[in-house]
Amino acid sequence: QQQQHDVFEERHLRFISPLGKGNFGSVELCRYDPLGDNTGELVAVKQLQPNKQANMVDFQKEIQTISSLHCDYIVKYRGICYSAGRLSMRLVMEYLPYGTLIGYMEKNKRNINNRRLLLFASQICKGMEYLQSLRYVHRDLAARNILVASDTLVKIADFGLTKIIPFDKEYYRVTKSGESPIFWYAPESISEYIFSHKSDVWSFGVVLHELFSFCELSRNPKRLSLQQLGADLRGPMMAVQLVNVLKDNWRLPSPPLCPPKVYSMMLQCWSLNSEDRPTFCQLQDLIESSIQDERE
Ligand SMILES: C[C@H](Nc1nc(-c2c[nH]c3ncc(Cl)cc23)ncc1F)C(=O)NCC(F)(F)F
């Protein structure tokens, strides 16, 4: 459905600092300051990389996607800014001052307990339930794409790869793989480019692993998987080998001190057969019961 977009005037959008680079865009911290007295709000502004105008169609789809999402656990869309000079437009989103989950974990891991990790997991799960209710498949669920709004609130962000499942199918098949984050991908996504709510559940299991590993680089899913594969493999060979070890029932090892119930949740998300994976609704119940266990 066509959205009414809030329009931000470029002349009032003042650049402050770069935040980072995404799939084919970059995000900057800006202040929207129409009064010119520094009382305007801070916003995160996403634009295409200059030489990547080819992705304009994908960027417009990303804007359509994020502007249709209204959920406490998904980064808020603010509007768009038409750049008079450049042909392109820019996506204006709320700015979350605590930054990415990975950066937050590195800084605060010493005073984050299992209950807080499970609270974050529950919020990501609720965000994914909401996405699923609109037939969206995120396709890039990973700790790097989770933002921290406060010490007790995280939000899903970066909808650059999100697709809508057609009404007559239960999955979405992509043509190209691109630089895919295969270490977060379900086997059917790696080998057949099939994406569904069940493949998002697999990725959610990997995010759980990242949470209970405090996003430590030494325990990063890519590093642990490459160790298992023997890192001499490159490109397509690696994808084939990864699917093979997954079929041989290798899985990411339990993070140190991870409660057994939480690791068993991850293993359920990583069922080879997508039908055997829990729904986000069932995961919500499992997480709630783990939170109860932590309370005792
Ligand atoms: C390319 C951009 N990268 C970064 N963004 C931010 C950020 C802080 N605060 C933010 N508030 C709203 C937004 Cl949209 C981003 C940030 N910090 C470091 C980054 F490297 C990005 O979008 N990353 C995906 C996701 F947002 F999920 F982390």
Image: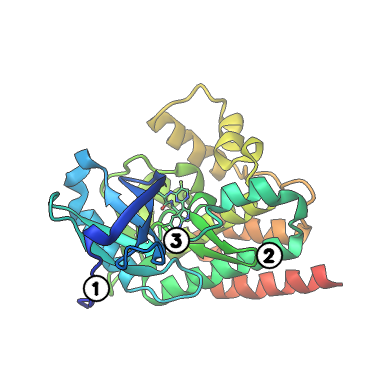
Q: Quadrant of the N terminus?
A: bottom left
Give SS at disc 1. Answer: loop
The image quarter containing residue 24 is: top left
Q: In the displayed structure, would residue 268 be above or below residue 190?
A: below
Q: Which residue is mark 2?
A: 118
The residue under the point 29% across, 67% down is: 34
Q: Which mark is residue 277?
A: none
Q: Ligand 1: does it lie within 8 Å of the C-beta at label 3?
A: yes
Instruction: Determine the secondary structure under disc 2.
Output: helix
Q: Secondary structure at mark 3?
A: loop
- Which disc number belongs to residue 5? 1
Residue 179 x %, y %: 36, 39
Viewed as shown, does residue 107 lie left or right of 238?
right
Residue at (57% x, 37% y) in the render: 225
Evaluate whether residue 74 shows in this view. yes
- Outermost residue toward the right in this view: 296
- The amino acid type, in three-letter code, at marker 3 is Tyr
Considering only vertical position in the picture, is 130 above or below 62?
below
For marks 3 and 1, give the CA distance: 18 Å
Residue 213 visible: no
Q: Which residue is mark 3?
A: 95
